[in-house]
Amino acid sequence: MKLIKNNIIKIIFLSTLFIVGCNEDNFLDQTNPNATTSDTFWQSEKQFNSALSTVYGALQFQSVSGGELQYEMILGDIAGSESWYRPTAFRNLTYNDGTYHVTDKWNELYVGIFRANQVIQLIETADESIFTGNSKKQIEAQARFLRAFFYFQLAHTYGGAVMHTKIAETKDDLLLPFSTIAQVTEGIIIPDLEFAQNNLPQYWDTNDLGRATWGAAKSLLGKVFLYDKDYIPAANLFKEVIDSEVYSLTAEISDNFTHENEFNSESIFEVNYSFDLSPGVNGAIVDDNVNETGAESTALATAMGQLNFGGYNTLLPSYYLHEMFENEEVDPTNPVNDGNLESKRMNSSIAPSDGEGLYYGVPFRTKSGWGYGQSAYVKKHSNWYHLEAEPANNRSGINFRHMRYADVLLMYAEAVIGASGDYSTAITYIDQVRKRAGVKTLQQYMDANSGSFPQLHVSLQVHGAYPMVQPNAATVLKHIQRVERPLELCFEGHRWKDLVRWGIVAEVFNELRQDEIWREANKATILNVSTGGIAPLFIAERIRPDFVLCASNYNPAQHNYFPIPAQEVQTNKNLFN
């Protein structure tokens, strides 16, 4: 059993409570001798580990690693929805500073930060004698890694953050100004990750799976530099992770999205969920709910699962993503393939109407679906592979992987191009990912086409042929941006941040809107009612307009990052000082 999942406890965090008392009878001045206080709690290594477990517990909040991530997954080019579903506000870029996920994510990330701050501050003055071995530094390193992770999410979701690094003792301690991404990165994220990488082990034993490691700290630090376009240190950090040989691609890509091979060789930082703990509690209620100890499960599978199999399918693959998957050429000489026509990563990521194998235990189209413009559904993070339907009450035990080795390989490929223009090395690492997916590598394309490879992000249905390009720093980087990262990492929480940091949101939205316009103009040939559409997408009944509003609404100053929640603006008088 996994330690962190079972050791989540409830601790009273005095730093987040402000008790306003009256003088009558001095009631609030009385001391309860049985109460847990800051004076009696922080007295042993076990208590510090218990407090640390609550910091890990904040990772399970739905806006951090669970069901609410659907609202960010829909922001980019890989997904759409229907007008009657809640994610539409994010698809159309019509959310505001009071919208549910905008406020939830801010609040939940700060819960994690306040918890981490307590551990970090109080362990500094703790008696060395209560700790064994290197445990004091390892506890602090884990707390600092988690604080850096929470701040990275804040900075790149809201364009900055309010920098809290100490326990708040008064209300005014909470009223701090908003800091930029650069200020948060330099002031908190980099120092915390440098401490973490120097004090965390490469491995934990099986009782401690889920704890932050050296590789997680180094990978996240590399990502920080990559986002800052500081390519040389980013490349060096990723290469250290690669050369350590601690991680490797799993033989089956699907092992990264199911409950059957969790904490595998590809996993770098993974958040634990359980279907079995707290049965009967809704999966959208995690950690700090009033129902016993919390559901400890995730609602993400219900959001992804197909409507006729107990899910809501509120997140739908875009035609862009679906078509790229359909057109991936399976390499018959690759032993990972066994007669399959779909790529291995397509089979583990999306469910088209003509999918291979079983879907929730039955052949495709056994139940209805794939109509009214819905050409495919999301498989990742859902229970399609072992159940007949999604469990009731929004419950799933599938872990969420925030960082995995395939992502590091692709980030390294991007970093070496940025550092030196070395596209040949980049292709080598891209092709490692493509080989595991069972598809033709860029090198195979170049060998067969006089050194050229196709621009696979261009719609074959709309344009009739792929443009062929010679490899260079620009074309290989575009392949990473428009093909490899969306295919390999779709619905894993990276896409919108990628598009924003590359500065290509408007370009992508406009291209995909033009594809929609073409499909609408040619729907008489695309929508064949008698056959349920034509290959490769088999779109039926209507063209779903995923990009009609976001393409016209997008304003980088307004939409690259979420607005600061209204509640923070209204209560923090120093926010913009």
Image (cartoon, grey):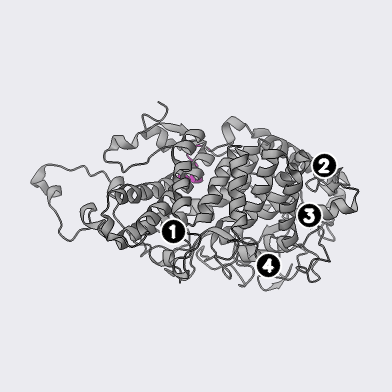
Q: Secondary structure at mark 1?
A: loop
**Mark sitting earlier along the chain (1/2):** 1
**Mark sitting earlier along the chain (1/3):** 1
Amino acid type, residue under disc 4 in the picture: Ala
Q: Secondary structure at mark 2?
A: helix
Q: Which residue is mark 1?
A: 285
Q: Contact (CB < 8 A) between labels 1 and 3?
A: no
Q: Position of residue 446 (x, y in %)?
A: 86, 50
Q: Contact (CB < 8 A) between labels 1 and 2?
A: no
Which disc, if any, is residue 251? 4
Residue at 57% from the left image edge and 45% from the top image edge? 223
Q: Position of residue 347 (x, y in %)?
A: 72, 64
**Is residue 534 toward the left or the right of residue 145 in the image?**
right
Q: Which residue is mark 3?
A: 539
**Is residue 523 toward the left or the right of residue 265 in the image?**
right
Q: Which residue is mark 2?
A: 518
Amino acid type, residue under disc 1 in the picture: Ile
Distance from Cα at disc 1 to Cα at disc 2: 43 Å
